[in-house]
Amino acid sequence: MDGLEARGVAGPFALKGVDLRVRPGEWVALLGPNGSGKTTLLRVMAGLLKPKRGAVYLEGKPLEAYGSYARGRLLAYLPQGGPYPEGLLVEEVVRLGRLPYLGLWGREGEADLEAVAWALEAAGAAHLKGRLLGTLSGGERQRVLLARALAARPRYLLLDEPTTYLDLEHQGEVVALLRALVARGVGVLSVLHDPNQAALAHRVAVLREGRLVAEGAPWAVLTEPLLRGLYGRRVRVALLEGRPHVYLDG
Amino acid sequence: MTLSLPLALKRSLVFAWLLALLSIALVLGLALGAVAVPPGDVVRALLGLQENPIITELRLPRVLGGMLVGAALGVAGAAFQGLFRNPLADPYLMGAASGAAFGVTLLAVLLGGLSPAFAQHAVFQGLPLSATLFGFLGALFATLLTLVLAGGVARTGELVLAGVVVGSVLTGLTTYLMLQDADRVRAVFAYTLGNLAFLGWPGVRALAVFLLLALPPLLLLGRVLNALQLGEEVARSLGLPLNGLKLLLLAAASLLTAASVAQAGIIGFVGLVTPHALRRLLGEDYRLLLPASALGGAALLALADLLARTLTRPAELPVGVVTTLLGGPFFLYLLWRRRGRA
């Protein structure tokens, strides 16, 4: 069975029984108001939180059946915000992404250096590799952290608000990068709180008070009635070229 | 703009500098003191060509022991700072210092009738072995108590809070015990000030054993401390068995702290300032920062002890007073410079 799948996940914090599946080569956006359990679900699916009920399956096997390094090779997790190791070189930060292959004392080989170079390139951060992380702008730093997540060449990427604090240009770069990765077969699950970015994903899953209230293609999910239920009566949706655009009524 | 070449060069230079500083500290430490010994005589005494107990029985163990204490404090400080992701963490964060002082005070009380003699001994001839042992046990006890109160190593914030609580309570108990008898106050006071005058060959051997035990795991876990700088969740998502590793790091750093507190009392600022200053020169790569902090701490404490022995010749200052007097303003300078840059 393909994919990373939450089945009946309930227990930690707000979650009250959630089923969600991310397939390889698919970008699923997780949307919902503050406190709806988005980040918790992401952490459960990354294997960082244990659900009280239900379980997470990775390619058909329970997530706990994987060793922690094996899990780290398949799933990469990027939380929202810091901490940031400001005194580490960009290249050293990205190399940390190879830990699931190196363990505590393994020496970096050709494959590791290649993967690091590829990740830097893919994230558009190759030119930054000799800089200290603390000297970068917010957008540059986010690209480096993404490169760190990519360095293990994971099959699934779990991202918590990967575009927060980025200006429109850098948001666009991150979205383009995610699309390119998905095209290569990576499964992406990203928490987003901007419905317009969620509209760019293949599928949108909407959480409310710990339950999945809608799931499907953006045009089917991001409707005025649903979004008004989530965010209030001022929300308006316009379909432009088949894609929903969400805005607030002045 | 790339900094990688100059940075690599800078890093090698820092290590060369530290080694040079350490050698200078060793030579000066042996040659200078209440009585100056000419360098030629120092070399002859070291090679066994000339009998000179001032060098071989007093200064050599003191300088070497001081370097071992400094190395232990430097590495423990770097490890605690990395573990807690806080550049203001120091080796005594888990309550080891208060624990050691409490242990020694408790011993003084247990030996109630002997306390004036104990005080005399501690102040004028160095701490007896029992005091070292009680200091060590006290430091370990405090660290373990902090761990238990924090419910393990999982929640870093609670560890810091528990450390503060344990430190305060033990300091309060120590003060209470000390107030019972003025003689004990002197003995324990001499100890808490931090002093390398107590160090002889047995102390050096004990320190060497603990460094051999605790230094390798710390130096080998630089990669883990690096990963921790990305946050504990990311470190775990990379597959690191974090609870076990944190416990190992904490145990090793605490063992180093306990061993150094037991032998030399509470020496402030070495464990705080050394990694802090080196981080500015080397960056935050703990694979470099840990060994550099060992060298830097060793050099710093040996040089501070040189000042302690020579500033008020023929009398001596406790080295803890020197490190605090020098370290405090230096630390302020570092903070001030950082603010200036920001």
Image (spheres, coloured by chain):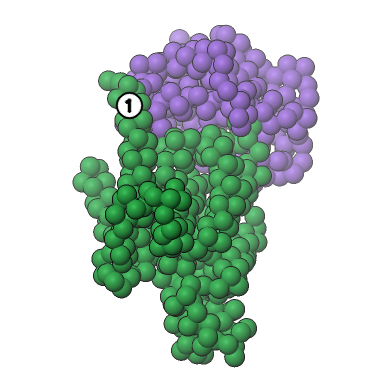
Nearer to me, B251 or A175: B251
Query: x and y percent of residue A124 in the render?
Result: 40, 15
Nearer to me, A102 or A77: A102
Residue B296 higher or lower than B58, as above or below: above
Nearer to me, B340 or B282: B282
Query: x and y percent of residue B339 in the render?
Result: 24, 48
What colour is chain B?
Answer: green
Query: x and y percent of residue A47 in the render?
Result: 67, 34
Nearer to me, B73 or B79: B73
Q: Residue at x 39, y 21 (%)?
A: A129
Quadrant occupied by the C terminus of chain A: top left
Label 1 is found on which chain of the structure?
B
What colour is chain A?
Answer: purple
Residue B22 higher or lower than A68, as above or below: below
What amino acid is found at the position of numbered circle 1 in the picture? Leu
Q: Secondary structure at mark 1?
A: helix
Q: Which residue is mark 1?
A: B9
Name the side, left or right, on which A182 lies relative to B312.
right
Q: Residues within 10 Å of mark 1 (few under 14, many from 20)?
A: few
Q: Residue at x 36, y 52 (%)?
A: B42
Residue most toward the left?
A: B340
